[in-house]
Amino acid sequence: MSHERFYSRVNGPTLHRVNTVRWLDEVAPRHLAGGGDPRHVTEYLLASGWSNHSVAGYPHVLLESPDGRLHLTLEPEADEFKASWRVHPAQGRAWSAQFGLHTPVEIIAGFTDALNSTKPRPEEAELWRLAASRGWTMRLAGRERAALSPDETAYLSRESSLAETPIPRWAVQVSVPIAEGRHRWIWNASIDEAAPPAALAGFINALTDPTPLLRSEGQTPQHTFGFLDSQRSPVTPEQHRLQHLRRLEAAQRTGTDTPSSPPPGPARHKRHR
């Protein structure tokens, strides 16, 4: 039986069933835009030759790279402190990358799109310079470096684990302030520094990119209301769907990196409160 007969998010809202979406908004800062449609990540990997090993009847996605060396797992966790997305080697635990449920898929795609890239490892200083060039403020976290987003709701840091043999990793914490100096966590992410270098660089590039993300009604987390700048996009739902299909076609043709999210048209943004 076709899934299109069901009232389900698998049929939309933006990538496949466009008739139910009246418009799209350009939302900034992108790290508060909400998770979006996971198929931005999963369908790209499938188009690139990854295989699907998901268990029918269980709410998850299990993908394996064409060479069988990498696994991606998506098992949604409502708890913002737990990882919903996990990427790691199929054998052993030389490294791992984990992302919370509300991590925008376009930012996750910055990592997953580049997993097969053979680009050389960038110098750590290059990654910090990239963040600083986009308005992120450099900080010191003990002996480690960190950066704070221009709106001060995202914190990027390089830290070491507390294990007997410390493992350097990059971490992101996204939160919004609430009463009495407290914060409400939106999502967390961590990537071990031993992860493929181009993928780590792609993640930081996608995280710090100031370009707004496209979202339809109801796709942004409720706790981010008042912290988002939003403007109606000139990109229609149908155009957005076609952009997604072109992205998949490029993956099928080349199996190499393509931009993780096409930039929306220029717009002036208004803050929603």
Image (cartoon, helix red, strand yellow):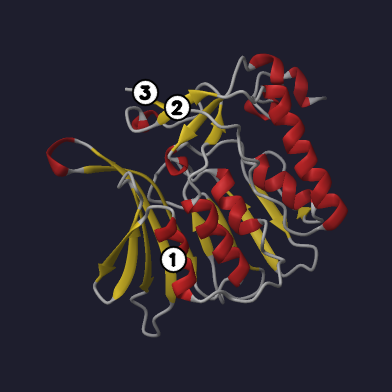
| Residue 272 drawn at (x, y percent) | 36, 23
Three-letter residue code for mark 3: His
Three-letter residue code for mark 1: Arg
Task: Of the two numbered discs 3 and 2 on the same chain, state the one appearing first in sequence.
Answer: 2
Q: Is residue 55 visible?
A: no
Mark 2 lies on a secondary structure that is strand
CA gap, disc 3 and disc 1: 31 Å
Residue that carries the numbered disc 3 in the rendered image: 272
| Residue 211 drawn at (x, y percent) | 52, 42
Residue that carries the numbered disc 1 in the rendered image: 129
Q: Are marks 3 and 1 in contact (CB under 8 Å)?
A: no
Three-letter residue code for mark 2: Ser
Residue 106 to residue 132: above or below: above
Q: Residues within 10 Å of mark 3 (few under 14, many from 20)?
A: few
CA gap, disc 1 and disc 2: 28 Å
The residue sitting at 71% across, 72% down in the picture is 118
Residue that carries the numbered disc 2 in the rendered image: 230
Residue 19 to residue 81: above or below: above
Q: Are marks 3 and 2 in contact (CB under 8 Å)?
A: yes
Q: Is residue 124 visible?
A: yes
